[in-house]
Every structure is written in C-alpha cells, then in structure tokens.
Amino acid sequence: MFSWQRSERDPLWRREMRERWRRPITLLFLTLYAVGLSWAAYSLYSSIVPPGNVELGMQSRGIGRRLFLELLKIQILVWIPVAFLLGAPAVAAERERRALTDYLLAGLQSRQIVRAKFASISTFIVVMCAIPLPLLTLCFPLGGVEPLELICGFLLEIAVATVCASIGLLISTGNKRVTGAMQNAVILALIFLFLGMVIVPGLLLMSFWVWLTLAGFLAGGTVYIMAGCDDTLRIVSHNLEMEEPGGQLPNFSFSPIPVAPPDGLPTLPSSPAKAGTDNGSDVADVSFWDIWAEKLSGWNAVAQREVRVGIRESRRRAEFAPPTSPFLYSLWAWVASGLCGAIMVALSRIVVWLYLGLAVMTLIAVIAATLGSSAAFTREREQKMLAQLRVCPLSPLEVVAGKMGAILLLVARSWGGPLLALLLAGLGQGVFIAFEISVFVVLTLVFAVALATLLSLVCHRTAIAASTALGILFVVFVVLPVGSGPLVYFLPVLRGLFSSFPLRPLWIEPMTLLSSSSVGFPTSSLSPAAALFRLVCSLLVADGLLIIATTYLWSHTTPDDGQVKRRFWERDISRSWR
C-alpha cells in the first residue's frame, strides 16, 4: 500500500517500478535463480544421503541444518556480485542517455532519483530472496533448523544484498559512463566476494541472534550509504551545466586548430601526435601507446573513431588526476623489466609468481575489454546512431572488426606495458612456451571482446550485455576447469557432455593443468606446452565462430531493431505485473 501511494505521488518511482518488472530478462533471472538453487539443494542432498537410500532413520536426523546453512551461504555469496552489478548502471545509464538533466529540469530532486532507483533494485532483491523460501522450509523435516533461523537468515541475506546494491549505486552516481561504473563495481565485487568466502562460513556457525544483529548493522550502513548517494548526486547536479550533452566528453578536434576549452579547464592537445607542441606541454607526458594506437587504427574508420574517443576520454581524466611518472609510459622500461624477470625465472626456476601475476593481469585486461566491448553497439542503439552506422560505406565485417580492434588497441594502451613485461618474463621457461603463452593471452582477449560485442547486438542495455558476458567467461574459464569434477559427481547427466571429445581433451584438461600449475601443484601428465597448444587451437576456433556470428547478426540488424514489437511485449508484461 505504501509503495502504491508513493508511486502515485512520484512519477519517477512509478516509472522505475514498471521498468524493472516489465522486462522479460527479469522473468528469466527469476527462473534461473530458482532452478539453480533447486539444483544446488539436490547436489547437497546427494552428497549427504547415498543414492537410493530413501529411508531416513534417526541417524539421518539433523542433516537439514547442514543443507540450510550451505544453501544460505550460496545465496549470500551469489548476491554479493549480483547486487553490485544491479546498482552500478542505475544513475550512470541516465547520464549516458541524457535523461538525468531532464529529470532535474522537471523539478525532481536528487533524493527522489536515488530513492526511486534504490526502490526498484531493493524490490527485485526482496522478491528474488523470497523465491527460495519454500526450498529452505524443506530443511525443517530433516531436523536441526529453527524457525527463527530461517527468518534471521532471510533478513541477513537481504541486508547483504541491499548494502552491496547501495555501494554499487554510490559508484554509479560518480561515473558518467556505464562501462566505467561497471568496471569499478566488478573490482569491488571481487574484493567483497573474496572477503565473503572467508567470513561467511564462520559467521553462519554462530547463533542466529548474531545474524540478526549483523543484519541491523548492515541496514544502518545502507541508510548511511544512501545519504552519500544523495549528496554525491546533488554535487553532480550542480555541475551538469559544465558537462557536454549526454555525458559525452567535449568534442576536442583533431585538426591543427585547437578548440578553446570551457573556463576553468586546462587546454588539451588536439591529438597524441601533437601533444608535445600544444600548450607547451612536455613530450614526456605523451604516451607511446597513444601514438601507436592512433596510427594503427587508421586502417578502419570505425576503429579510428572509437580509438580517438577513448584517448580523449582518458587524457581528459588524466588532466584532473595526480601527476604520473613518465617511467610508466615508457615502452623500454617495461621491456627492461620483463627481461630482468626472465633472468630471475631462469635462475630460480620458480614460476608460481609469474603465473599468478600473469593470471591477475590477464583477468584485469579481460574485464576491461569485456566492459568496453559490451557497449560497442548498445551505446550506438541508445544514442540512435545505428542508422548512421548502417549507411557508412563499410562492409559488416569491417564494422565488426573496427569495433573489436578499437577495444583491443585501447586495452593494449592501458594494460599493454604490464602484460608485455610479464610475457617477456616467460622467456625464462623457453621461447616456445613464452610464445604460446603470449598467443593464449591475446586469443583470450579476442574471445572476450568477440563475445561481449555479440551480446551488445543481442541485448539492448550495456549493463545486461556486460553482466551476461562476465557470467559466460566465469563459466568457461573457472567453472568448467575447476568445477567439472563436482558437477559430474553431483549431476551425472553432465558426465557424457564433459567427457566428449571437443570439450574434455581440448579445454577442460588443459585449463585444469594450467590452473593447478599456477599454484604450484600440477595434477596432470600433460605437458604445459601441449596444454597451451590445445587451448590455442580451441580459442582460434571459438574466436572465428564468434566473429562470424557477430558479422552475420550485424548484417541483419535494422536501425529500429524491433523496437515496436519489444514495446508491445513490455506493455503486456507490465500490465500483468501491475
């Protein structure tokens, strides 16, 4: 009743509620969440009770508590990254599609905007957390669970999810772009997920009164963070007139004639190649990667546009960042570091730290590439630029290649130095293995970019495309090599799939070997060189198929892209839910 009255008074509240619940993707999330938890309950029950033993005697009483705690732990850990990704694009998407200024001009206060966004996210979280309650109540007949434990566990789960969503919303209020907000949210989500994996198992062994107390503290923290979101958005709203339309960066021309910046802003050089001459700036401030990224993008007009926009954005942010040492921009400094690392690896024969550093740096680069590629076509769709892109004199393959190549160049510009140093350090193991590792890293980045670009054509929102791409990458690179054994044990129906020829020898076994070698405990007789060769062949095939699929889909994409049919679909779903 309160929510209905609030929605009648506040049009933004009503819009957010309808926007959240009329999407077909919401129904898909609800279904997948219920199915996943049901499968997890079946797997946990199968690991406790032997198959075929349906008689639960007195010795089996009490297994309900173990099932309850495991399911509650799974839900809390799942909600940590999901809540971050729900809150991160909320306000940044409005700034990117030019809606935040309209809200403020219509008389809406920053408090109303923040509350409407948080209400939309929190109602979704409450409904999603309430879905598995019937499943959790099945633990009562198995013994060991009290009703208050169910209530306190439910409140703790909601408190964890809402505080993570409020942090994501705070990140969103300080970013102009969805990709930047998503990147910061993913990094924080990984940190919180690691802390949760350490803290949550021990916390659930305590009394349920401790859970209730912690839920109260988290609720208070959520209120405090929401006040911070209100203050941040109020500050942003005062400076919106200093921004360009739609949250875009000022259109600094690449012509020799410099464009005068707004008052109070430093003058930026027109291009990386002219950075040493414009405004008397020092040549050391120019990045080697900027110059070569602009030169290499000249083969494609789409790639050149994307690279120049990315360089202008990063250099604009660098003007307001603390000064950075020119050493970080030097190519030869990274080469020298890599060669010194190769000598140390060859002498010490300790490659664990090399693999760990390479895995972490590749993970960061893959996340940046995925988030950047997920906005490749969704941003064009939101800014009504698909028609202009369709009529440009380029073939579908050239457009897709330009989008993907631009992201790869921008990722190389940002993370190319550390990756180059780590890849050169791999020479301590041999030239052939170092070459295979380099090819594997490059093909992994291409796979992430191709997958996110394909999803940006399928999805209409950058946040949905980025979340789906990150989920698929997590399954492919983490769940399959690490969790294939438990999955086959708990769900025998997957045994035939995981033991098939393409998947088992060409992906699962090599990835399992590399993941175990990275921590110093190889568990397979397969040599690292053979494992890398199999992975390179698999990624070559997968990258080719993704590029072909993206090109075909782009060639059959129309400027309206089925907007009329989608609006009728969402209208019918909205009527059913409201």
Image: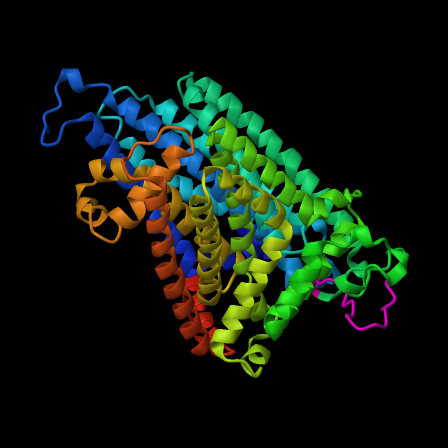
In front of the other: 228 or 327: 327
Color scheme of the displayed model:
rainbow
Residue drawn 55% across and 48% down? 365
Coordinates of residue 80 in the picture (x, y in percent): 49, 37
In front of the other: 273 or 106: 273
Residue 280 found in image quarter: bottom right
Q: How many marks?
A: 0
Coordinates of residue 533 in the picture (x, y in percent): 35, 50
Coordinates of residue 478 in the picture (x, y in percent): 38, 42
387 drawn magenta:
no
Coordinates of residue 465 in the picture (x, y in percent): 48, 58
Residue drawn 46% across and 31% down? 352
Tell me the quarter of the image containing the C terminus.
bottom left
Residue 272 found in image quarter: bottom right
Residue drawn 35% across and 61% down? 541
As displayed, is residue 574 above or below residue 119?
Answer: below
In front of the other: 337 or 184: 337
Q: Main secondary structure of the magenta part?
A: loop
**Is residue 109 visible to the viewer in this orientation of the structure?**
yes
247 drawn magenta:
yes
As displayed, is residue 403 above or below residue 464?
Answer: below
In front of the other: 566 or 475: 475
**Is residue 10 visible to the viewer in this orientation of the structure?**
no
- The stretch of residues the image draws in magenta is 246-263
Residue drawn 85% across and 53% down? 282
